Amino acid sequence: MSIGIAPPATVSQPDASRSLWSDAWRRLGRNHVAIASGGFLLLVCALAALSPWLPFLRDPTLQDLGLGATPPSWAHWFGTDDLGRDALARVLWGGRISMLVGLVGTAVSLLVGVTWGAIAGYAGGAVDEAMMRVVDVLYSLPYIFLVILLLVLFGHSIVLLFVALGLVQWLTMARIVRGQVLSLKRQTFVEAARALGASDGAIILRHLVPNTLGPVIVYTTLTVPAVILQEAFLSFLGLGVQPPASSWGTLVADGSRVLAIFPWLVIFPGLALSMTLLAFNFLGDGLRDALDPQDRRDVS
Amino acid sequence: MTTLVLRRLLLFVPTLWVIATLTFFLVHLAPGGPFQSEKAIPAAARAQMARVYGLDRPLGQQYARFLWSAAHGDLGPSYEYPQRQVRDILRDGVRVSAELGGWALLLAVLTGVPAGVLAAVRQHRALDHAAMAIALAGVSVPNFVLGPLLVLVFSLGLYWLPPALWSGPASRVLPVVTLSVAYVAYIARLTRAGMLEVLRQDFVRTARAKGLSEPVVVVRHALRLGILPVVSYLGPAAARIMMGSIVVEQVFAIPGLGRQLVNAAFNRDYTLVLGAVLFYAASLMLLNLFVDVLYLRLDPRVEAA
């Protein structure tokens, strides 16, 4: 795999213009759909992050019982719900939670998965065998059932939600990183580092992990939408984010209860959620083509 | 092949044990219990119920008893519906879920594979781009968004199909379509990728050079190999889809396994939760093994590796 051969970033590269990363940037730049998706995601992130300070946005908790539910209009672009709350404000504030959950959950899965995979791959032998059997067994767990159980039994705290979502996603990450490390650790730059007296920890952290970045970045881009989707799914069942906070999942769940009379309360949050997931998937596809042109069989 | 099957079957035992243990302690260590409804029950009656279900014994003893009877296929009576055995409840749920999943999977294969083949044959043309954009959209729209939207259009708008429940053929349409869309999309993407890989190979060129017509080359020669990624995906997919989609069953109020499990968790119906989780895990592993064996049959090269 081409990624494995690139020297570690610490070595100076005389011909920087032909490095793996600039090559990848050029390939990504040619993929207009991926670039547009990236731009869209930046916009969504900015709107969600800044929603408390946007001047035109109403307070999402401000009720207007006299107004009640109204279809989209100039005053309320996405309409209002049965309590007279502005749906646009609720969708943007919901995006805050959904994106936050997606990013934190992915961070948890990155931390656990990369560490686990790197150690297993580097140690090899019995340690590797044992660690990967654990992953195999965990793979066959009916995870989503266990997460539901966890949340029902131990209460719906948002910390528990983050941890549960992150822990569902780390297994594939561990496998990817282990595979990369296995093929990397026999290469001469690792031997050179060892000959220079680098400790095992330093070799893993400084030399091996940075070289697995390509596949890790690609998989991370695909993990964020997966986590967002899982959170929305749990919120849809009433197990995720609790009121008065709301995510896209809770908005769709609330809206689908009044689907017959106020359909816009499903359509807009559903659209926001679907378009964000779609953009992440497009971007992930584009990144895979850019970073890993050889390996295009896996289409997850 | 026999050794492979035996090795995998042997791995079932520790895996199921881990799952059983994890779920058991998760359920039993959680605050709150099964008989704590809003109704005030006399302390004596509660103690009596706990004794009947063995909940008054030490946790270790309960655990041993649970493992012993689960190993013998006895999952005990449901806490919520004491007159029914967990086994019977699960059987009813699986029947519904398997039908829903079976139709959805059939629909997914019958539309996803041809779409993927067409896209691969027309690589980089408009048809390919359109098919793949639609497929990516299909993967991205969550089924709890898609379900209500379909209901909105076809039930509430056009009055063509019933919006919920599970009675009569017409009620099957919307849930099956909702459940299958993500799988259609994914299978189309897998088929396209697999076919692109195969269509580049020498034996395809040979087939063309022999003067075979393009449809024969694509369908009779290339598809046999190009479909392999789909086959290996079908295992886990079939297991998941057959065991019922929690969301689709929730959206359409279908009494399948997924809905049972969610309800059991909310009701703290411990025996039903444990039974459903174990049953789900065991079926998942069996179906995966079955697919791996099927894979060996289709592609003899795998065994050598």
Image (cartoon, helix red, strand yellow):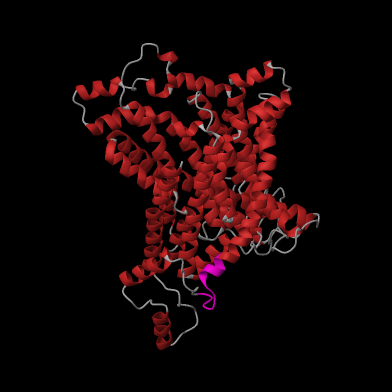
Which residue reaches farthest top? Answer: A14
Residue at left offset 51%, top offset 42%:
B292
Which residue reaches farthest left? Answer: A197
Q: Nearer the viewer, residue B176 or A271?
A: B176
Query: Residue B143: image x %, image y %?
Result: 62, 50
Q: Quadrant of residue B14?
A: bottom left
Q: Nearer the viewer, residue B198 or A79?
A: B198
Query: Residue A239: image x %, image y %?
Result: 51, 60
Q: Nearer the viewer, residue A40 or B176?
A: B176
Q: Quadrant of the C terminus of chain A?
A: top right
Q: Which residues are magenta?
A: B80-90
Q: Quadrant of residue A194?
A: top left
Residue at left offset 32%, top offset 43%:
A131
Q: Is residue B29 visible?
A: yes
Residue at left offset 40%, top offset 46%:
B7
Q: Is residue A240 visible?
A: no
- In magenta stretch: residue B211: no
Residue at left offset 34%, top offset 26%:
A184
Q: Quadrant of the N terminus of chain A?
A: top left
Q: Nearer the viewer, residue A84 or A143?
A: A143
Number of marks in picture: 0
A271 to B302, vertically: above or below: below
Query: Residue A25: image x %, image y %?
Result: 49, 22
- In magenta stretch: residue B84: yes
A104 to A221, vertically: above or below: below
Query: Residue A90: image x %, image y %?
Result: 58, 52
Q: Quadrant of residue B53?
A: bottom left
